Image: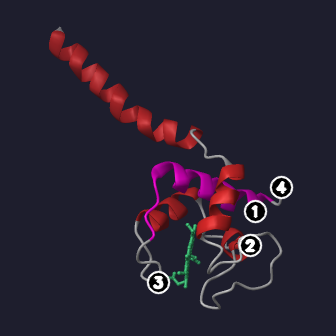
Amino acid sequence: MRHLCGFAVGMVLTAVPASLNAQVVGDPQRGSVFAQQVCAGCHAVERGQPSSPNPQAPTFDAIAKTPGTTEMALYAFLRTSHHTMPNLILTKDDISNVVAYLLSLKDGR
Ligand code: HEC
């Protein structure tokens, strides 16, 4: 019986993070502030800005409107540093906030 219980709990624990992830959304407001401070040196972070300070860096508007831009893709991207952003270390909170902000641009809200 003990074994069975442990097994059931294990199942629940492995099943939960996926569903939690979908629900724990970052705060787009804080993401916006964070983007202004950390990303704006290279990226245009405001909606409707035509070009980024660094011409290599796509505007956040453009990133948001790329069809392949999903929460998953952004998380994956921001967990690994892009080679042009070597020293950028984001905490999990920073990532979820900035992802929430980026996705809010996509919605046109
Ligand atoms: C030092 C300049 C620089 C900073 C700071 C910077 N980026 Fe970038 N970023 C770039 C460049 C250049 C590219 C395009 C080339 C690449 O993907 O490496 C890019 C690409 C991206 C992409 C991928 C776009 C795509 O089409 O796949 C995302 C998402 C992104 N940056 C998010 C961020 C976020 C969020 C921040 C702030 C936490 C940030 N960047 C800060 C220079 C920067």
Instruction: Determine whether 89 is above or below 85 in the image.
Output: above
Is the residue indicated by label 1 positioned so its CB lies within 8 Å of ligand 1? Answer: no
Q: Give the labeled residue for mark 4.
A: 109
Which label number is shown at residue 105? Answer: 1
Instruction: Estimate the x, y position of residue 79 in percent, counting from the top left.
Output: 43, 62
Is the residue indicated by label 4 positioned so its CB lies within 8 Å of ligand 1? Answer: no
Q: Residue at x 35, y 29 (%)?
A: 13
Mark 2 surroundings within 10 Å by alpha-carbon count, few (fewer than 14), some (14 through 19), many (20 or more): many
Instruction: Determine whether 10 is above or below 65 in the image.
Output: above
Ligand 1 positioned in quadrant: bottom right
The quarter of the image holding the N terminus is top left
Which residue type carries mark 4?
Answer: Arg
Between marks 2 and 3 in the image, the one whose residue lies nearer the viewer: 3
Which residue type carries mark 2?
Answer: Asp
Side of 87 where 35 appears, left or right: right
Q: Give the labeled residue for mark 3.
A: 84
User: Are the two marked residues, 2 and 1, in contact with CB atoms closer than 8 angstroms?
Assistant: yes
Q: Which residues are magenta?
A: 88-107
Label 2: element kind:
helix
Q: Earlier in the sequence, mark 4 or mark 3?
A: 3
Which residue type carries mark 3?
Answer: Thr
Between marks 4 and 3 in the image, the one whose residue lies nearer the viewer: 3
Q: CA distance from mark 1 to mark 3?
A: 23 Å
Q: Residue at x 75, y 86 (%)?
A: 51
